[in-house]
Amino acid sequence: MHAANIFHLGIKELRSLLRDPVILFLILYAFSLAIYVSATAMPETLHKAPIAIVDEDRSPLSSRIIDAFYPPYFLPPALISQAEMDARMDAGLDTFAINIPPDFQRDVLAGRSPTIQLNVDATRMSQAFTGSGYIQTIISGEISSFLQGYRANPTPPVDLALRARFNPQLNKSWFGAVMKVIDNVTMLSIILTGAALIREREHGNVEHLLVMPVTPFEIMAGKVWAMALVVLAATACSLIFVVQGMLEVPIEGSILLFLAGAALHLFATTSLGIFLGTVARSMPQFGLLMMLILLPLQILSGSVTPRESMPEFVQFAMLAAPNTHFVILAQAILYRGAGLAVVWPQFVTLALIGTTLFGLSLARFRKTLATMA
């Protein structure tokens, strides 16, 4: 009877979900358009940045530097005079303005250290920080290549051979698409279970369940498996049709193995959603709790910034969060083609965290039902 009750309670949750067009739209958007936008519009990517150059030297070296800036990172450089530079920056026409001084090539060949002025519009923060490094690298590379033709030994003593594994083109859309799927799995699983519980309490359906021959465990388990199944199905469709299909992101490992890890992660996050649903008394309160819980989980899990760059106490504390282990196994499977022999520690950890969260949520859920009885 326990299994039958859990099954039918889960079917009830699925039927209730089908009658909620707002939640259905959120699921569809989160695993389709949101993935595509996140992958194709990464904010830290330098793309078609406007740049202007004041060439007071008009030498072969300065022309070579000008020709080095081209799409897609930069727009074709606008050649301006020094008098126009400040006015264009004030008007927001240029993010970067380079001033090449007179006799620049002659000073470089003479072994002096001439200075190129780079003006940056720092109000465009996403482009300003990344673009400054790009410009320094481009100019230094062009000067080094130019000087090799004037030296007795044009070949540098050391040549760096760069080989990027797993993402040879350094395409940031590959990273953005998969990480957005991972973040949305967490977000939707918490929202669906928490919102389902609050919606039942607001509509008075919990009182109806209390008079039925079902236990709190069966009620909670029905919500967990139903919402986890919805998110898992949406994740599989998103990986196949959006990530692999529309965005053409190569998936190196087994999607089935990843979905198995996602199921364990959903076991933990749906239990967390139930816990938050018992703490919050209304949907607005639940939304505020989501902001306090979800943002730290996603930002500190390693999906945005590598965990190695965080303080050690943050790394240690985040080991208690399911997101951290889910990100590790997802990156290992989907990017590097890892098998179960590599990611089994994350599977075991997710199972332990999920069991703990389920137990805590069940205790809280029983206490909540007791106060309503």
Image (cartoon, rainbow, N blue to C red):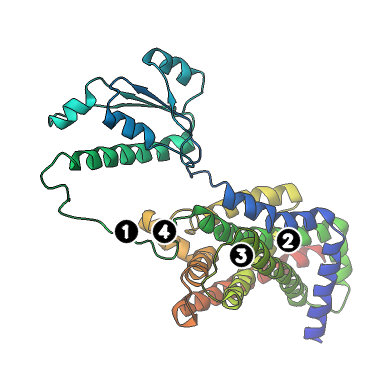
Are circles 3 and 2 on residues that touch, CB within 8 Å?
no
Gap in Å between the C-alphas at discs 4 and 3? 27 Å
Gap in Å between the C-alphas at discs 4 and 1? 24 Å
Gap in Å between the C-alphas at discs 1 and 3? 27 Å
Count the numbered circles shown.
Answer: 4
Compared with residue 94, is residue 363 higher up or lower down, i.e. above or below? Answer: below
Q: Amino acid at mark 1?
A: Leu
Check disc 2 and report the residue beneath it. Answer: 192
Gap in Å between the C-alphas at discs 3 and 2? 26 Å
Q: Indicate which disc residue 162 carries.
A: 1
Where is the C terminus found, in terms of image quarters? bottom right
Q: Position of residue 275 (x, y in %)?
A: 66, 63
Q: Amino acid at mark 4?
A: Arg
State the image quarter where residue 309 is shown: bottom left
Compared with residue 347, is residue 14 higher up or lower down, i.e. above or below? Answer: above
Residue drawn 49% across the image and 81% down it: 340
Q: Position of residue 167 (x, y in %)?
A: 45, 61
Check disc 3 and report the residue beneath it. Answer: 244
Q: Is residue 71 left or right of residue 148?
A: right
